[in-house]
Amino acid sequence: MPNLVLIGGGHSHAIALKLFGLNPIPGINLTLINDVEQTPYSGMLPGHVAGFYSYEQTHIDLSSLSKFAHAKLLIDRAIGLNLEQNQVICHHHSSISFDYLSIDIGSTPTTISVPGAKEYAIPAKPVPQFLVAWSKLLDIAKNNPEQSLKIAIVGGGAGGVELALNMYHRLGIEIGAANNYQINLIHRGNKLLAGHNNWISQRLEKILLKRGIKIYLQETVEEVLPDKIRCQSGLTLESDYTFWVTQAHAPDWLKKSGLATNSQGFILVKDTLQSVSHPHIFAAGDIATMVNYDRPKAGVFAVRQGKPLLKNWHRIIAGEPLKPYIPQKKYLALIGTGDKSAIASWGSIGWQSPLLWYLKDYIDRKFMNRFSNLNTLISNN
Protein backbone atom coordinates (compact mmCIF):
# COMPACT_ATOMS: atom_id res chain seq x y z
CA MET A 1 0.00 0.00 0.00
CA PRO A 2 1.73 3.25 -1.14
CA ASN A 3 2.50 6.00 1.36
CA LEU A 4 1.66 9.59 0.44
CA VAL A 5 3.28 11.96 2.93
CA LEU A 6 2.54 15.68 3.16
CA ILE A 7 4.92 18.12 4.84
CA GLY A 8 3.22 21.33 5.94
CA GLY A 9 -0.33 22.50 6.47
CA GLY A 10 -0.25 25.37 3.99
CA HIS A 11 -3.21 26.57 1.94
CA SER A 12 -2.62 24.18 -0.97
CA HIS A 13 -2.45 21.16 1.30
CA ALA A 14 -5.46 22.28 3.35
CA ILE A 15 -7.63 22.46 0.23
CA ALA A 16 -6.23 19.23 -1.17
CA LEU A 17 -6.93 17.42 2.12
CA LYS A 18 -10.53 18.68 2.18
CA LEU A 19 -11.04 17.47 -1.40
CA PHE A 20 -9.27 14.19 -0.58
CA GLY A 21 -11.77 13.59 2.22
CA LEU A 22 -14.63 14.15 -0.21
CA ASN A 23 -13.07 11.85 -2.83
CA PRO A 24 -10.46 9.58 -1.18
CA ILE A 25 -7.91 7.54 -3.10
CA PRO A 26 -8.50 3.87 -2.19
CA GLY A 27 -5.56 1.94 -0.77
CA ILE A 28 -3.41 4.92 0.21
CA ASN A 29 -1.71 5.60 3.53
CA LEU A 30 -1.91 9.38 3.96
CA THR A 31 0.23 11.21 6.54
CA LEU A 32 0.44 14.93 7.29
CA ILE A 33 3.50 16.28 9.12
CA ASN A 34 3.13 19.76 10.59
CA ASP A 35 4.70 21.49 13.58
CA VAL A 36 1.42 22.93 14.91
CA GLU A 37 -2.14 21.65 15.08
CA GLN A 38 -3.70 24.99 14.15
CA THR A 39 -2.49 26.35 10.83
CA PRO A 40 -3.00 30.07 10.08
CA TYR A 41 -4.82 31.49 7.07
CA SER A 42 -2.68 34.37 5.81
CA GLY A 43 -5.57 36.34 4.31
CA MET A 44 -7.10 37.05 7.72
CA LEU A 45 -3.97 37.45 9.83
CA PRO A 46 -3.70 41.25 9.39
CA GLY A 47 -7.32 41.49 10.52
CA HIS A 48 -6.48 39.30 13.50
CA VAL A 49 -3.63 41.66 14.40
CA ALA A 50 -6.10 44.56 14.20
CA GLY A 51 -8.57 42.71 16.43
CA PHE A 52 -11.24 42.14 13.78
CA TYR A 53 -10.98 38.33 13.92
CA SER A 54 -10.37 35.86 16.73
CA TYR A 55 -7.64 33.24 16.73
CA GLU A 56 -10.19 30.53 15.95
CA GLN A 57 -11.57 32.45 12.98
CA THR A 58 -8.11 32.72 11.39
CA HIS A 59 -6.81 29.18 11.91
CA ILE A 60 -7.61 25.81 10.36
CA ASP A 61 -7.83 22.86 12.74
CA LEU A 62 -5.55 20.29 11.15
CA SER A 63 -6.65 17.60 13.58
CA SER A 64 -10.24 17.74 12.32
CA LEU A 65 -9.10 18.16 8.72
CA SER A 66 -6.81 15.12 8.96
CA LYS A 67 -9.57 12.99 10.46
CA PHE A 68 -11.92 14.05 7.66
CA ALA A 69 -9.30 13.10 5.06
CA HIS A 70 -8.52 9.80 6.88
CA ALA A 71 -4.94 10.99 7.28
CA LYS A 72 -2.54 10.47 10.17
CA LEU A 73 -1.46 13.80 11.69
CA LEU A 74 2.08 13.91 13.08
CA ILE A 75 2.85 17.06 15.07
CA ASP A 76 6.53 17.52 14.37
CA ARG A 77 8.93 19.59 12.31
CA ALA A 78 10.57 18.17 9.21
CA ILE A 79 14.30 18.94 9.26
CA GLY A 80 15.59 16.96 6.29
CA LEU A 81 15.01 14.42 3.55
CA ASN A 82 16.82 11.18 2.79
CA LEU A 83 16.07 10.90 -0.90
CA GLU A 84 18.05 7.69 -1.34
CA GLN A 85 15.71 5.87 1.03
CA ASN A 86 12.67 8.14 0.49
CA GLN A 87 12.36 9.25 4.10
CA VAL A 88 11.37 12.46 5.87
CA ILE A 89 13.69 13.23 8.78
CA CYS A 90 11.76 14.70 11.72
CA HIS A 91 12.94 16.69 14.72
CA HIS A 92 11.34 14.49 17.38
CA HIS A 93 9.99 11.33 15.73
CA SER A 94 11.62 8.57 13.74
CA SER A 95 12.00 9.05 10.01
CA ILE A 96 8.82 8.68 7.95
CA SER A 97 9.00 6.60 4.75
CA PHE A 98 7.15 7.69 1.64
CA ASP A 99 6.45 6.58 -1.90
CA TYR A 100 5.14 10.02 -2.85
CA LEU A 101 5.82 13.29 -1.07
CA SER A 102 4.20 16.73 -1.21
CA ILE A 103 5.68 19.86 0.42
CA ASP A 104 3.76 23.02 1.36
CA ILE A 105 5.58 24.69 4.25
CA GLY A 106 5.49 28.33 3.23
CA SER A 107 8.50 30.61 3.62
CA THR A 108 10.23 32.79 6.21
CA PRO A 109 11.75 36.31 6.05
CA THR A 110 15.48 36.53 5.38
CA THR A 111 17.34 37.67 8.51
CA ILE A 112 20.48 35.56 8.62
CA SER A 113 22.80 38.07 6.93
CA VAL A 114 22.00 40.96 9.29
CA PRO A 115 23.90 40.92 12.61
CA GLY A 116 21.56 40.73 15.58
CA ALA A 117 18.41 40.12 13.52
CA LYS A 118 18.22 36.45 14.42
CA GLU A 119 18.58 37.24 18.13
CA TYR A 120 16.48 40.40 18.49
CA ALA A 121 14.12 40.74 15.51
CA ILE A 122 10.70 39.08 15.41
CA PRO A 123 10.05 37.48 11.98
CA ALA A 124 6.52 37.73 10.60
CA LYS A 125 6.83 34.02 9.80
CA PRO A 126 6.53 31.41 11.17
CA VAL A 127 3.18 32.88 12.20
CA PRO A 128 2.76 31.03 15.54
CA GLN A 129 5.96 32.57 16.95
CA PHE A 130 4.97 35.99 15.62
CA LEU A 131 1.54 35.80 17.29
CA VAL A 132 3.12 34.87 20.63
CA ALA A 133 5.35 37.96 20.44
CA TRP A 134 2.44 40.17 19.35
CA SER A 135 0.30 38.91 22.24
CA LYS A 136 3.06 39.75 24.73
CA LEU A 137 3.42 43.21 23.23
CA LEU A 138 -0.34 43.80 23.57
CA ASP A 139 -0.30 42.70 27.20
CA ILE A 140 2.52 45.13 27.98
CA ALA A 141 0.70 47.96 26.20
CA LYS A 142 -2.57 47.22 28.04
CA ASN A 143 -0.93 46.94 31.46
CA ASN A 144 1.32 49.98 31.00
CA PRO A 145 -0.72 52.51 28.98
CA GLU A 146 1.51 55.41 30.05
CA GLN A 147 4.72 53.69 28.96
CA SER A 148 6.14 54.85 25.63
CA LEU A 149 6.60 52.12 23.04
CA LYS A 150 8.73 52.18 19.91
CA ILE A 151 8.09 49.62 17.17
CA ALA A 152 10.17 49.12 14.03
CA ILE A 153 8.92 47.18 11.03
CA VAL A 154 11.59 46.22 8.51
CA GLY A 155 10.17 45.66 5.05
CA GLY A 156 7.96 47.89 2.92
CA GLY A 157 6.15 45.30 0.86
CA ALA A 158 2.45 44.52 1.23
CA GLY A 159 3.12 42.44 4.35
CA GLY A 160 5.07 45.15 6.17
CA VAL A 161 2.66 47.94 5.24
CA GLU A 162 -0.42 45.93 6.25
CA LEU A 163 1.23 44.95 9.51
CA ALA A 164 2.02 48.59 10.34
CA LEU A 165 -1.53 49.76 9.64
CA ASN A 166 -3.20 46.96 11.57
CA MET A 167 -0.82 47.31 14.53
CA TYR A 168 -1.64 51.02 14.56
CA HIS A 169 -5.35 50.26 14.76
CA ARG A 170 -5.04 47.73 17.56
CA LEU A 171 -2.70 49.81 19.70
CA GLY A 172 -4.12 53.24 18.98
CA ILE A 173 -7.86 52.65 18.90
CA GLU A 174 -8.55 49.49 20.91
CA ILE A 175 -5.97 50.15 23.63
CA GLY A 176 -6.08 53.93 23.49
CA ALA A 177 -2.32 54.38 23.55
CA ALA A 178 -2.06 56.53 20.45
CA ASN A 179 0.06 59.18 22.16
CA ASN A 180 2.48 56.73 23.71
CA TYR A 181 3.84 54.70 20.87
CA GLN A 182 5.65 55.19 17.58
CA ILE A 183 5.73 52.85 14.59
CA ASN A 184 8.65 53.22 12.16
CA LEU A 185 8.63 51.47 8.79
CA ILE A 186 12.07 50.88 7.23
CA HIS A 187 12.38 49.86 3.60
CA ARG A 188 15.48 49.44 1.45
CA GLY A 189 13.67 50.31 -1.81
CA ASN A 190 12.80 53.76 -3.11
CA LYS A 191 9.05 53.11 -2.95
CA LEU A 192 6.65 50.97 -0.96
CA LEU A 193 5.05 47.86 -2.48
CA ALA A 194 7.42 47.72 -5.44
CA GLY A 195 5.40 44.92 -7.05
CA HIS A 196 2.33 47.15 -7.39
CA ASN A 197 1.57 50.26 -9.44
CA ASN A 198 2.59 53.77 -8.39
CA TRP A 199 -0.92 54.80 -7.29
CA ILE A 200 -0.98 51.95 -4.76
CA SER A 201 2.44 52.89 -3.41
CA GLN A 202 1.64 56.59 -3.12
CA ARG A 203 -1.80 56.03 -1.63
CA LEU A 204 -0.51 53.75 1.11
CA GLU A 205 2.39 56.06 1.84
CA LYS A 206 -0.10 58.90 2.34
CA ILE A 207 -2.24 56.76 4.68
CA LEU A 208 0.77 55.70 6.74
CA LEU A 209 2.00 59.26 7.17
CA LYS A 210 -1.47 60.53 8.05
CA ARG A 211 -1.56 58.05 10.92
CA GLY A 212 1.80 59.13 12.24
CA ILE A 213 3.71 56.08 11.02
CA LYS A 214 7.17 57.26 9.98
CA ILE A 215 8.58 55.90 6.72
CA TYR A 216 12.29 55.51 6.01
CA LEU A 217 12.94 54.63 2.36
CA GLN A 218 16.25 53.56 0.83
CA GLU A 219 17.49 52.47 4.24
CA THR A 220 19.21 49.12 4.69
CA VAL A 221 19.38 47.73 8.21
CA GLU A 222 22.93 46.64 9.04
CA GLU A 223 22.52 45.72 12.72
CA VAL A 224 19.71 44.93 15.15
CA LEU A 225 20.29 45.53 18.87
CA PRO A 226 17.95 44.87 21.82
CA ASP A 227 16.82 48.51 21.93
CA LYS A 228 17.67 49.98 18.53
CA ILE A 229 18.44 49.31 14.88
CA ARG A 230 21.26 50.77 12.82
CA CYS A 231 21.19 51.39 9.08
CA GLN A 232 24.02 51.60 6.57
CA SER A 233 23.36 55.33 6.07
CA GLY A 234 24.14 56.02 9.74
CA LEU A 235 20.47 56.28 10.72
CA THR A 236 19.81 54.86 14.19
CA LEU A 237 16.27 54.27 15.46
CA GLU A 238 15.26 53.27 18.96
CA SER A 239 13.14 50.14 18.94
CA ASP A 240 11.57 48.15 21.74
CA TYR A 241 10.22 45.62 19.23
CA THR A 242 11.62 45.03 15.76
CA PHE A 243 9.45 43.06 13.35
CA TRP A 244 11.07 41.55 10.26
CA VAL A 245 8.92 41.38 7.10
CA THR A 246 11.49 41.24 4.32
CA GLN A 247 12.04 39.10 1.23
CA ALA A 248 11.28 35.47 1.93
CA HIS A 249 13.55 32.45 1.74
CA ALA A 250 13.27 28.69 2.19
CA PRO A 251 14.75 26.54 4.98
CA ASP A 252 18.27 25.26 4.26
CA TRP A 253 17.38 21.58 4.62
CA LEU A 254 15.49 21.54 1.32
CA LYS A 255 18.54 22.41 -0.74
CA LYS A 256 20.79 20.16 1.35
CA SER A 257 18.44 17.25 0.68
CA GLY A 258 19.34 17.25 -3.01
CA LEU A 259 16.08 18.68 -4.36
CA ALA A 260 16.54 21.14 -7.21
CA THR A 261 16.06 24.68 -5.85
CA ASN A 262 16.58 28.25 -6.99
CA SER A 263 19.02 30.72 -5.41
CA GLN A 264 16.59 31.45 -2.53
CA GLY A 265 16.20 27.75 -1.79
CA PHE A 266 12.66 27.38 -3.15
CA ILE A 267 11.80 24.04 -4.76
CA LEU A 268 11.78 24.21 -8.55
CA VAL A 269 8.68 22.53 -9.96
CA LYS A 270 7.27 21.69 -13.37
CA ASP A 271 3.81 22.79 -14.52
CA THR A 272 2.51 19.57 -12.94
CA LEU A 273 3.81 20.81 -9.54
CA GLN A 274 6.37 17.97 -9.52
CA SER A 275 9.97 18.61 -8.52
CA VAL A 276 12.12 19.03 -11.63
CA SER A 277 14.70 16.69 -10.08
CA HIS A 278 12.48 14.17 -8.28
CA PRO A 279 9.15 13.56 -10.06
CA HIS A 280 7.67 11.58 -7.15
CA ILE A 281 7.88 14.74 -5.02
CA PHE A 282 5.42 17.63 -5.33
CA ALA A 283 5.60 21.17 -3.97
CA ALA A 284 3.05 23.98 -3.82
CA GLY A 285 2.46 27.36 -2.23
CA ASP A 286 5.24 29.77 -1.34
CA ILE A 287 7.86 27.03 -1.01
CA ALA A 288 7.54 26.19 -4.72
CA THR A 289 8.77 28.14 -7.74
CA MET A 290 7.36 27.19 -11.11
CA VAL A 291 10.17 27.17 -13.66
CA ASN A 292 7.89 28.27 -16.53
CA TYR A 293 5.98 31.00 -14.69
CA ASP A 294 7.40 33.95 -12.76
CA ARG A 295 4.80 34.68 -10.12
CA PRO A 296 5.00 36.45 -6.73
CA LYS A 297 4.74 34.58 -3.45
CA ALA A 298 1.04 35.30 -2.89
CA GLY A 299 -1.66 33.30 -1.16
CA VAL A 300 -3.97 33.43 -4.17
CA PHE A 301 -1.65 31.09 -6.07
CA ALA A 302 -1.36 28.66 -3.16
CA VAL A 303 -5.15 28.49 -2.83
CA ARG A 304 -5.62 27.76 -6.52
CA GLN A 305 -2.92 25.07 -6.57
CA GLY A 306 -4.82 22.86 -4.12
CA LYS A 307 -7.21 21.25 -6.60
CA PRO A 308 -4.72 20.52 -9.42
CA LEU A 309 -2.26 19.24 -6.81
CA LEU A 310 -4.80 16.72 -5.56
CA LYS A 311 -5.70 15.61 -9.07
CA ASN A 312 -2.05 14.96 -9.89
CA TRP A 313 -1.68 12.92 -6.70
CA HIS A 314 -4.52 10.78 -8.02
CA ARG A 315 -2.92 10.50 -11.46
CA ILE A 316 0.61 9.61 -10.37
CA ILE A 317 -0.65 6.93 -7.98
CA ALA A 318 -2.90 5.50 -10.71
CA GLY A 319 -0.04 5.55 -13.22
CA GLU A 320 -1.81 8.08 -15.43
CA PRO A 321 -0.27 11.09 -17.23
CA LEU A 322 -0.19 14.23 -15.10
CA LYS A 323 -1.80 17.49 -16.22
CA PRO A 324 -0.29 20.99 -16.03
CA TYR A 325 -1.48 23.81 -13.84
CA ILE A 326 -1.25 27.25 -15.46
CA PRO A 327 -1.37 30.17 -12.98
CA GLN A 328 -3.19 33.34 -13.96
CA LYS A 329 -1.08 36.30 -15.11
CA LYS A 330 -2.89 38.90 -13.02
CA TYR A 331 -4.53 38.63 -9.63
CA LEU A 332 -6.60 40.92 -7.47
CA ALA A 333 -4.76 42.00 -4.33
CA LEU A 334 -6.90 43.41 -1.51
CA ILE A 335 -4.78 45.26 1.04
CA GLY A 336 -6.47 46.09 4.34
CA THR A 337 -5.74 49.54 5.75
CA GLY A 338 -6.49 48.66 9.38
CA ASP A 339 -9.77 50.60 9.57
CA LYS A 340 -12.18 48.23 7.81
CA SER A 341 -11.33 49.76 4.47
CA ALA A 342 -9.18 48.20 1.78
CA ILE A 343 -7.21 49.04 -1.32
CA ALA A 344 -7.55 46.94 -4.46
CA SER A 345 -4.61 46.41 -6.80
CA TRP A 346 -5.15 44.93 -10.25
CA GLY A 347 -2.30 45.48 -12.69
CA SER A 348 -2.18 49.22 -13.37
CA ILE A 349 -5.51 49.84 -11.62
CA GLY A 350 -5.92 50.77 -7.97
CA TRP A 351 -8.77 52.07 -5.83
CA GLN A 352 -9.84 52.31 -2.19
CA SER A 353 -13.22 51.81 -0.54
CA PRO A 354 -14.80 50.37 2.63
CA LEU A 355 -16.80 48.18 0.24
CA LEU A 356 -13.54 46.47 -0.71
CA TRP A 357 -13.01 45.52 2.93
CA TYR A 358 -16.38 43.78 2.95
CA LEU A 359 -15.47 42.04 -0.30
CA LYS A 360 -12.19 40.87 1.24
CA ASP A 361 -14.01 39.81 4.40
CA TYR A 362 -16.54 37.82 2.33
CA ILE A 363 -13.78 36.08 0.32
CA ASP A 364 -11.78 35.22 3.45
CA ARG A 365 -14.76 33.93 5.41
CA LYS A 366 -15.88 31.87 2.41
CA PHE A 367 -12.45 30.24 2.30
CA MET A 368 -12.46 29.46 6.02
CA ASN A 369 -16.02 28.14 5.89
CA ARG A 370 -14.68 25.21 3.85
CA PHE A 371 -13.14 23.90 7.05
CA SER A 372 -15.78 24.95 9.60
CA ASN A 373 -18.11 21.93 9.56
CA LEU A 374 -15.58 19.09 9.46
CA ASN A 375 -16.52 17.57 12.81
CA THR A 376 -20.15 17.34 11.68
CA LEU A 377 -19.11 15.71 8.42
CA ILE A 378 -16.89 13.25 10.30
CA SER A 379 -19.77 12.30 12.59
CA ASN A 380 -22.10 11.78 9.63
CA ASN A 381 -19.55 9.50 7.99
Image: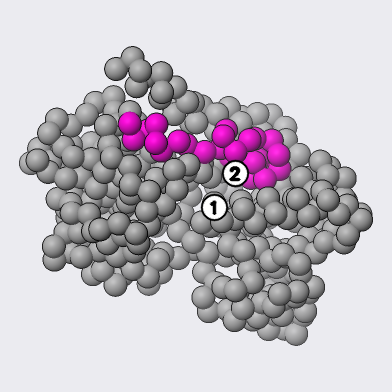
Residue to which mark 1 is pinned = 127
- Picture coordinates of residue 116 (x, y %)? 61, 78
Question: Which label was assigned to residue 45?
Answer: 2
Residue at image coords 25%, 58% = 94
Q: Amino acid at mark 2?
A: Leu
Q: Is residue 330 visible?
A: no
Find residue 46 and report its image quarter. top right
Query: Disc 1 versus disc 2: distance between alpha carbons?
Result: 9 Å
Residue at image coords 29%, 28% = 21
Q: How many callouts does the rendering have? A: 2
Question: Relative to the observer, which residue lies in front, 338 or 24?
Answer: 24
Q: Please indicate whether residue 85 sits to the left or right of residue 264 in the image.
A: left
Work out whether 197 lies above or below 316.
below
- Picture coordinates of residue 270 (x, y %)? 25, 54
Work out whether 373 lies above or below 183.
above
Find residue 327 and report its image quarter. top left
Magenta residues? 44-67
